[in-house]
Image (tube, rainbow, N blue to C red):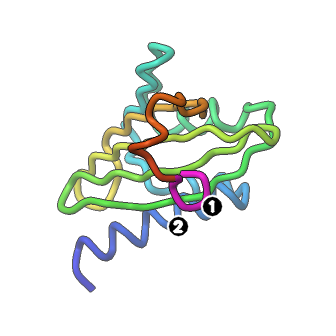
Amino acid sequence: MTRDSTIRARIAEHWWASEAGDIDAEHAIYAVDAILDYPQSGERFRGRERIRAQRGGHPAERHFTVTRILGGGGLWVSECVITYDGAPTRSVSIMEFTGDLVARETQYFADPFPAPPSRAAQAEPMPDGG
């Protein structure tokens, strides 16, 4: 198994564990001193335990659907739909690896919005709504 295929499998396991609510497996991918940034809210969480604590206290019912995982070497991107209490939000997770652990992750979130009629002639619907 190549390093890239090992990391891809670890990322897939991370998202599966997130969906399953397995908090130990979900956070096993992070280095002890990992950093998680949420640029839209201006928050930084330093260290695996703080990352775990902020996610563990989330009040919403959450579900994770991975639409794709891309990357190689030390840089990987996951596109996901995270559903909070039934409302879908698109998420992009950028993971930077040192060895086989995430040293830094940056997550961006975007709520869906209706397509403007002015683009209808140029656009086609994306499969599964996105």
Against 15, residue 85 (above or below) is above
Quarter of the figure with the N terminus: bottom left
Which element carries disc 1, helix, strand or loop?
Answer: helix
Give the labeled residue for mark 1: 17
Q: Is residue 59 left or right of residue 97?
A: right
Q: Residue at x 22, y 80 (%)?
A: 2
Q: Is residue 59 magenta?
A: no
Q: Is residue 129 magenta?
A: yes
User: Residue 89 falls in which quadrant of the image?
Assistant: top right
Residue 72 on image: x %, y %: 21, 62
- The amino acid pointed to by label 2 is Glu
Residue 26 on image: x %, y %: 58, 55
Give the labeled residue for mark 2: 13
Q: Residue at x 80, y 31 (%)?
A: 59
Q: Residue at x 63, y 30 (%)?
A: 54
- Please state the extent of the stretch shown in magenta in the rendering: 125-130
User: Residue 49 falls in which quadrant of the image?
Assistant: top right
Whether residue 27 is visible here, answered yes or no, is: no
Q: Nearer the viewer, residue 89 or 56?
A: 89
- The amino acid pointed to by label 1 is Ala
Mark 1 Cα shell of 10 Å, populated few (<14), some (14-19), many (≥20): some
Q: Is residue 108 left or right of residue 65?
A: left
Against 7, residue 48 (above or below) is above
Residue 30 on image: x %, y %: 42, 48
User: Residue 71 falls in which quadrant of the image?
Assistant: bottom left
Identify the disc placed on residue 88: none
Against 15, residue 88 (above or below) is above
Which element carries disc 2, helix, strand or loop?
Answer: helix
Q: Residue furthest left?
A: 73
Q: Nearer the viewer, residue 12 or 69?
A: 69
Q: Are marks 2 and 1 in contact (CB under 8 Å)?
A: yes
